[in-house]
Image: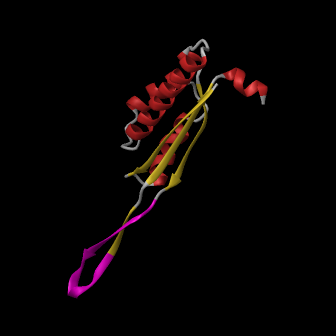
Amino acid sequence: MEAKAIARHIRVTPMKARRVVNLVRGKQANEALAILKFAQQAASEPVYKVLASAVANARVLADRDGVAFDESDLYISEAFVDEGPTMKRFQPRAQGRAYRIKKRTSHITVVVATPENEEVR
């Protein structure tokens, strides 16, 4: 079984979010949630929420299909961060000049799966 969760337009730069996602890629879902809960990076909070949502989506899919569900079997099969739209702002500078500030956003995607799903492929 495979379940996916996506968070779009998250106000954290993609490079910072990728550092956090790289910590948990390929790990079991419960272990990854524990790692994210205590990670010091600010980007760990939205990644934690997306992973928790993916686990909840897996639970709902299992209930719908009538499949036995064990949360400890889930692991992160895919996790990646794409770049979202960039908000452009201007900072006033001396002598009437203006500097452009780029406020970057991210699209965070997490896919959780059970091990038997990978054996079928």
Compared to residue 43, the image places residue 66 above or below, namely above
Q: Where residue 38 sits: x, y (%)? A: 38, 30
Q: Which image quarter: residue 120?
A: top right
Q: Which image quarter: residue 100?
A: bottom left
Residue occupying image coordinates x 56% and y 14% = 70
The single residue placed furthest to the bottom in the displayed view is: 95
Instruction: Give the magenta-colored segment's residue range.
Output: 85-99
Q: Where residue 63 sits: x, y (%)? A: 54, 17
Q: Which image quarter: residue 43?
A: top left
The single residue placed furthest to the left in the displayed view is: 95
15 within the magenta span: no
94 within the magenta span: yes
- Left or right of 101? Residue 118 is right
In terms of depth relative to the viewer, which is nearer, 53 or 39? Answer: 53
* Quarter of the figure that contains the N terminus: top right
* Quarter of the figure that contains the C terminus: top right
Residue occupying image coordinates x 59% and y 26% = 75
The single residue placed furthest to the top in the displayed view is: 68
Q: Where residue 32 sits: x, y (%)? A: 50, 28
Q: Where residue 28 sits: x, y (%)? A: 57, 24
Compared to residue 86, the image places residue 109 above or below, namely above
Residue occupying image coordinates x 53% and y 52% = 82
